[in-house]
Amino acid sequence: MSLTLHIGNKRFSSWSMRPWLALKRAEIAFQENIIPLDQEETRENLLALSPAATVPVLETPDGTIWDSLAICEWAAEKAPGLWPKDPAARARARAITASMHSGFAALRSELPMDLQHPPSAIDMSVACWRDIEAVQALWAHVKAADGPFLFGDWSIADAFFTPVATRFQTYAVPLSTEAASYVETLLSDPDYKEWKSAACDESFDAPFR
Ligand SMILES: N[C@@H](CCC(=O)N[C@@H](CS)C(=O)NCC(=O)O)C(=O)O
């Protein structure tokens, strides 16, 4: 089966990183195609892939799937181990993943993912600090004792929080000991390191806007 995952620049595209990590973890072979973001032709290129005009998009022989979570769910149908085996844990994994997918707007806008940005603290709004507290509280709420990841073994929930871990590192966000240790786990993952290394080598034209 021929699969192409269309993604944004690895330096910036936090949404693209999530399904890329899930496909890698599931050992589902795919080609990747980078659509540089913030260029004059970006919107036209995105619209050629899907009416949503966003990346990631997975092109499959049965049609294209847009949206990071939908692509991860597609992968989990091929590789069920991407979600926890226990139904109660699986429900909680989906809940925390959905929280990330639909929430934390202040964190996302004030602490954009930039994998070439040297670590340094910046001023943040109260709303952003609340998001940071909520993320750490959610992690503590679900964290399993029997493994380094949120639900013990790696799951899609960890894919969704890996870009958050990069933001915490980039903006030198002070974290609880437990949260800092989980961030370290996510950022030590070999698949993440492969993504990060490519992100550090990227050079695209300056943003169009
Ligand atoms: N909910 C979507 C969000 C995707 C999204 O916003 N992607 C950004 C890049 S990270 C994008 O394509 N933006 C369009 C643009 O920059 O023109 C998903 O989960 O895939």
Image (spheres, rainbow, N blue to C red):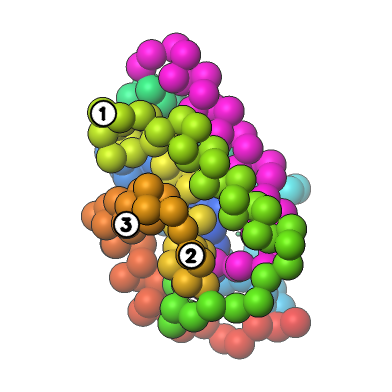
Q: Which mark is residue 146?
A: 1
- Count numbered badges in the picture: 3
Task: Say which element carries label 1.
Answer: loop
Label 2 residue near ligand 1, CB within 8 Å: no
Residue kind at label 3, given as amino acid type: Glu
Q: Quadrant of residue 109?
A: bottom right
Residue at mark 2 to residue at mark 3: CA–CA distance: 13 Å
Q: Quadrant of the N terminus?
A: top left
Residue kind at label 2, given as amino acid type: Pro
Residue kind at label 1, given as amino acid type: Asp
Residue at left offset 26%, top offset 34%: 147
Image spot of residue 94 (x, y percent): 54, 27
Pick whichever of labels 1 and 3 is earlier in the sequence: 1
Relative to residue 78, is residue 111 drawn left or right? right
Please tell me in which quarter of the rendered image ligand 1 is found.
bottom right
Pick whichever of labels 2 and 3 is earlier in the sequence: 2
Assess whether residue 65 is covered by the magenta stretch: no
